[in-house]
Image: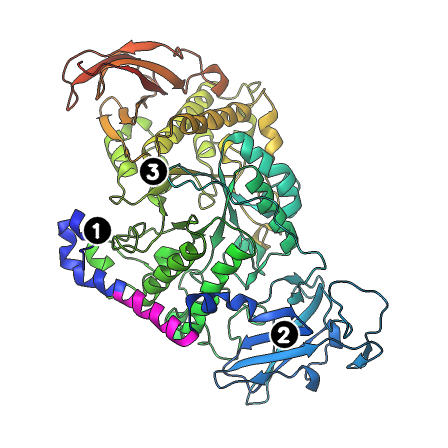
């Protein structure tokens, strides 16, 4: 067997070779078990079509895994909520799987006292009569235990749920529209070598009114905005149904049901189809790291036991999130979760998956209070069953969509997360650079005096990422509820964003200048792709806070006023332009994902100057708040002519217009650092600019 590339490239990992090989063995063993028991991976992952509630020829079919149940009944609007109707009692097999077939009702016949006679005909009717469960009507399953207790549950595989306005509880809904949405547009062209510019979104927040906004509104208002701004992907939070809105979708109750707060499954399909028509990828924020503790509408104690889907005892409870933790070794849990992924590929045409909480999944203590290092990555702290599941998840996703993108949110820095199986990795395409955003927050909180910033340390940490593991960088995502801009601006931040305001204008100008440097540096050096949370591109005012009891269910900080950035008398408009033009550099130059990670040619701690090269571009920053440099030398690899193509000081970005765009600079043939050429530049305080090599002289 050929040695894994991850070992060939890093001999220091050789001491962990047996662990890496064992992980590959565990994956293959789990895959073989699936094939042995179920015939194929296809049969296993297509379970979303065979479990739950489905219209089939001649009737409606229901299947549920409830191993601790004595009997299972289906009830709902269709039978007047007769909880133990003999006609809806399911058959049980030896594995605890219950099934029920409800044949269509013949004309003039009744079912449980309800007359189904009708003269109307549609796709749901056939020559035998009428469907027993009508589209968009409520259902639940009722589980009888050996003790005689009767449990009321939302079916685990249900495709839609709605909330009862009076009780607040959720019910399952049979979703079988007469006219199902048909996709009109193909998936976007594969972007194997292009950077992803990701706009992270929450549907409910994506509008100006103090309420929950919808899929349809997002399709009409936000997707065109995303396209015009230059983003080529959206990442959707909170799609899987969650009973607690303030969880932002991170405590899922119904995994196969798009949240009804935002609209219907058909409206979500239309949203994705519209994005595809504009060449925009759509990624699903995927919550397979834990599940809601809710009983009755979630998976917790679904069959009356705590261990059906989850670990027992304290291991089954997340110590921080207070949610349930899956038992990834259970083949039925694997069936549920892997089918969940295929469901969103097949039925909704999602282009990729951002796996939340990977750093929690892969450690038996959820990674709490651990100083991560290589020894930890291969220690008994690792939940190897979770690791195997993630191998399986990536295998399944790429099996059914070879161009799908998978992203790992892992704070621990686990080796090989974003490497292929063959290389010795987990199979993710990207990992999130979570440390970058945390670094900026820590720096701002620790050093009130900007002159204390150690730019050498900052640049090193931003650029420090695992070898050959593609990374998505960001300055802020939804996890940073208090935007950097408002940390810098302080009190009355919203008023200060107006050019007409007279409050602390020098401080405001300096803060906005620094913000632009932070963003450009992160964008330029910290990854192969880039992400922004919606609204942060123009510094949307206020924190991110969902309505809950502690803020009296207020939506004040759970909205996005995109129209603010249309007012040219504000810095919102200037920062929106800055973000657009920054992304345009990648569209034109394609430097992020070209394989060039960036060579840092200057990280001047004393003068707070940073410079680095990527592809044909040279990024130069002066973070000093009050010190200009009339003459500063930067070493460069390529000799010849360089031209300024972007400046943070441009008037249109709320700058002072002191750096000439299109200005050309010639290199000097003189060794500078490790480079054989140098350029002489003027550096103004709190500014940055990008030079492009436009006339390479090979002999210089």
Seen in the picture, residue 82 relative to 685 is either above or below; the reply is below
Q: Nearer the viewer, residue 496 or 634?
A: 634
**Lower position in the chain sequence, tag 3 or tag 2:** 2
Residue 159: percent from the left, percent from the top?
60, 63
Asked whether 431 or 496 is in front, the reply is 431
Nearer the observer, 44 or 114: 44
Res 44 label:
none
Numbered mark located on residue 6 in the image: 1
Q: Earlier in the sequence, mark 2 or mark 1?
A: 1
Give the residue at the far front of this rendering: 127
Locate residue 482, reporting x and y percent.
47, 40
CB under 8 Å between callouts 3 and 2? no
Span of residues in magenta: 25-38
The residue under label 3 is 527
Nearer the observer, disc 3 or disc 1?
1
Local crowd size for mark 2, using a 10 Å CA cut-off: few (<14), some (14–19), many (≥20):
some
Q: Residues within 10 Å of mark 3 (few under 14, many from 20)?
A: many
Helix, strand or loop at label 1? It is: helix
Q: Main secondary structure of the magenta part?
A: helix
Q: Nearer the viewer, residue 635 or 127?
A: 127
Q: Report helix, strand or loop for mark 2.
A: strand
Q: Position of residue 595 (x, y in %)?
A: 29, 36
Residue under circle 2? 61
């Amino acid at each position: 067997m050929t040695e894994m590339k991850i070992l060939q490239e890093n001999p220091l990992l050789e001491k962990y070779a047996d662990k890496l090989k064992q992980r590959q063995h565990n994956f293959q063993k789990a895959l073989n078990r699936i094939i042995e028991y179920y015939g194929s991976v296809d049969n296993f992952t297509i379970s979303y079509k065979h479990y739950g509630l489905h219209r089939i020829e001649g009737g409606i079919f229901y299947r549920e895994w409830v191993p601790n149940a004595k009997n299972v009944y289906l009830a709902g609007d269709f039978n007047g909520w007769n909880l133990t109707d003999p006609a809806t009692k399911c058959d049980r097999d030896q594995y605890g799987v219950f099934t029920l077939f409800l044949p269509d009702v013949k004309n003039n016949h009744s079912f449980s006292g309800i007359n189904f006679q009708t003269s109307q005909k549609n796709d749901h009717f056939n020559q035998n009569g009428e469907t027993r469960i009508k589209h968009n009507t409520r259902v639940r399953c009722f589980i009888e235990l050996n003790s005689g207790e009767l449990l009321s549950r939302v079916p685990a595989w249900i495709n839609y749920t709605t909330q009862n306005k009076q009780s607040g509880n959720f019910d399952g809904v049979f979703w079988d529209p007469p006219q199902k949405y048909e996709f009109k547009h193909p998936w976007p062209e594969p972007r194997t070598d292009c950077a992803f510019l990701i706009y992270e979104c929450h549907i409910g927040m994506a509008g100006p009114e103090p309420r929950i906004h919808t899929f349809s509104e997002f399709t009409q208002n936000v997707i065109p905005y995303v396209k015009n701004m230059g983003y080529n992907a959206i990442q959707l939070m909170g799609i899987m149904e969650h009973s607690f809105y303030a969880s932002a979708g991170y405590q899922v109750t119904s995994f196969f049901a798009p949240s009804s707060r935002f609209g219907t499954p058909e409206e979500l399909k239309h949203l994705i189809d519209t994005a595809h028509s504009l060449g925009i990828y759509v990624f699903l924020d995927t919550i397979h790291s834990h599940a809601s503790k809710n009983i009755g509408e979630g998976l917790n104690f679904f069959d009356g036991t705590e261990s059906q889907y989850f670990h027992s005892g304290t291991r089954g409870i997340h110590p921080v999130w207070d949610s349930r933790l899956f038992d990834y070794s259970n083949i039925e849990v694997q069936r549920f979760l892997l089918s969940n992924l295929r469901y969103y590929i097949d039925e909704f045409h999602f282009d990729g998956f951002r796996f939340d909480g990977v750093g929690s999944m892969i450690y038996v203590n959820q990674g709490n209070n651990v100083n991560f290092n290589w020894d930890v990555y291969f220690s008994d702290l690792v939940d190897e069953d979770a690791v195997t599941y993630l191998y399986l998840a990536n295998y399944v996703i790429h099996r059914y969509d070879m161009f799908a993108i998978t992203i790992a949110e892992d704070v621990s820095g686990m080796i090989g997360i974003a490497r292929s199986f063959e290389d010795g990795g987990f199979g993710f395409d990207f990992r999130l650079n979570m440390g970058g955003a945390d670094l900026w927050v820590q720096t701002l909180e620790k050093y009130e005096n900007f002159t204390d910033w150690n730019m050498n340390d900052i640049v090193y940490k931003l650029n420090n990422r695992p070898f050959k593991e593609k990374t998505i960088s960001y300055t802020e995502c939804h996890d940073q509820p208090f935007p950097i801009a408002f940390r810098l601006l302080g009190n009355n931040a919203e008023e200060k964003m107006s050019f007409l305001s007279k409050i602390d204008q020098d401080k405001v100008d300096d803060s906005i200048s620094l913000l632009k440097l932070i963003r450009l540096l992160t964008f330029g050096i910290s990854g192969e792709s880039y992400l922004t949370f919606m609204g942060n591109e123009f510094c949307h005012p206020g924190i991110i806070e969902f309505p809950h009891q502690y803020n009296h269910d207020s939506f004040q900080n759970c909205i996005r006023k995109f129209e603010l950035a249309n007012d040219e008398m504000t810095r919102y408009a200037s920062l929106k332009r800055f973000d657009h033009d920054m992304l345009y550099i990648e569209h034109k130059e394609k430097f992020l994902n070209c394989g060039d990670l960036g060579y840092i040619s200057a990280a001047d701690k004393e003068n707070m100057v940073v410079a680095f090269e990527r592809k044909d571009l040279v990024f130069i920053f002066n973070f000093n708040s009050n010190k200009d440099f009339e003459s500063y030398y930067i070493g460069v690899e390529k000799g010849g002519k360089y031209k300024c193509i972007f400046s943070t000081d441009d008037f249109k970005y709320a700058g002072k217009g002191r750096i000439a765009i299109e200005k050309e600079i010639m290199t000097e043939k003189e060794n500078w650092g490790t480079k054989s050429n140098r350029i002489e530049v003027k550096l103004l305080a709190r500014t940055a600019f990008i030079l492009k090599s436009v006339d390479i002289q090979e002999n210089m």
